[in-house]
Amino acid sequence: MCYLPFTLLAQDVIQTAKYVDTTGQTDLIDLGRSLFSIKGKRMKNKEGKNIYFSFLPISSAVPGGGKALITSTTAGFYLGPRDSTFLSSATFAPYFNFNGRFGIPLRSSLWLKNNGWNIQGDTRFLVYPQYTWGLGGNQSEDNKILVNYKYIRFNQAALKRVTNFLYAGIGYDLDYHIDISAEETNRIRSFTGYQYGAANDNNSFSSGATLNLLYDTRNNPFNPMPGCYLNVVYRYNSRMLGSQDSWKSLYVDARKYISLSNERKKNVLALWGYYWTTLNAGTPYLDLPSVGWDPYNRSGRGMDQNRYRGQGLIYLETEYRRDITRNGLFGYVLFASATSVTEAAGRNFKYINPAAGAGLRIKFNKGSDTNIAIDYGFSKGYNTFILSLGETF
């Protein structure tokens, strides 16, 4: 929990937003300029520029197997005075391979002038083959089927500031799964034992309004500094809005960042947990809570995305973040997580599934404090490398 007085906390965050101290810091842009003898022009604005880009073309595994070219681009920018407005963010990471798999996801979090409003967006079009292991936390690694579908997501929310760092608002969520099919005809429903949204050659359409509550003392989404975050989303899908079934869900996401020393080198303990649950019957199978399907698809490093699915999910992760060099160019992380989902019979949490790993950090852009993250994660029967821009949470 965050017990700092609001006035003191606000002053700390505003000062951090206004005076981004990059003195003595080095990033890959600096190294590129030095290597190719590029001389940058001296900035007239003492507060620095208002937009920062990071770009990373990579080849990585995609759900369902195989490799794809993923081009990850992040942008950090200010939509108001830097002394009173948090850094807005947009992430665009399209992927493509030569076997018909591709995706076009765009996510954004916009902080308007003086943090008066926060506008959140998540828009995607995906061709997304993915293995599923059915429901529950004790399914065998080999007991899986490959499910193919096309996916359209359009989730938007507008939140207005109520008090310092506390926001409330409404939103609209649309999730449309098209041409759902499995390796063998009519096998999805019989394999999962779940009746909603799991028929072959069928579509799943969910459309609903959301109530949103946000408490956020972070001023940088790419590399959060000490502070805390709480996001609560209540979703009500209604046939009046076109949803195939009326169903409700609740998502609660809490994070805390603790500085372990006062030295210049980063030394931070980051904590993350979320609880995601359906509140009644009727949720389509592909909309059920599943590890790796949190809003930013960041949970479950070291697990196959979708490995554990149920009508309720609890996720906990901790990460230790430390600079290696004083100029901030290199750093490392150590992380561990635990996932538990409800069983198919009833809604009880019975099994805990752990994962762990470590990663290297390379500073790409010191202005937005964006790192290239190279992580190795593992869990029972699975291990993988993950390459991305920005911290996982």
Image (cartoon, rainbow, N blue to C red):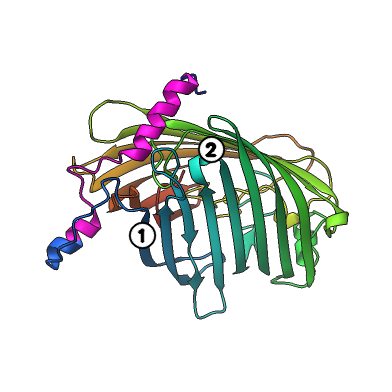
119 or 353, which is in the foreground?
119
Tell me where residue 198 sits by quadrant: bottom right
Mainly helix, strand or loop, the magenta region?
Answer: helix
On screen, residue 24 versus residue 8, left or right, reads left
The extreme bottom residue here reads 98
Dot 1 corresponds to which residue? 54
Expressed as whole percent of the image width and height from the top left, the position of residue 275 reads 64, 37
Say above or below: 36 vs 77. Answer: below
358 or 393, which is in the foreground?
393
Say above or below: 285 vs 67. Answer: above
Number of marks in the rendered image: 2
- Mark 2 neighbour density, 10 Å: few (under 14) some (14–19) many (20 or more): some
Q: Is residue 27 magenta?
A: yes
Three-letter amino acid code of the residue under disc 2: Ala
Tell me where residue 356 sits by quadrant: top left
Question: Which numbered dot is residue 338?
Answer: 2
Expressed as whole percent of the image width and height from the top left, the position of residue 144 reads 64, 60
Q: Is residue 148 visible?
A: no
Q: Could you tell me if the residues under marks 2 and 1 are in contact, i.e. CB atoms within 8 Å?
A: no
Q: Is residue 65 visible?
A: yes
Lower sequence index among marks 2 and 1: 1
Expressed as whole percent of the image width and height from the top left, the position of residue 27 reads 23, 53
User: Helix, strand, or loop for circle 2?
Assistant: strand
Question: Residue at (27%, 50%) from the top-left corner?
Answer: 45
Three-letter amino acid code of the residue under disc 1: Ser
User: Helix, strand, or loop for circle 1?
Assistant: strand
Q: Which segment is the magenta one?
A: 5-31
338 or 230, which is in the foreground?
230
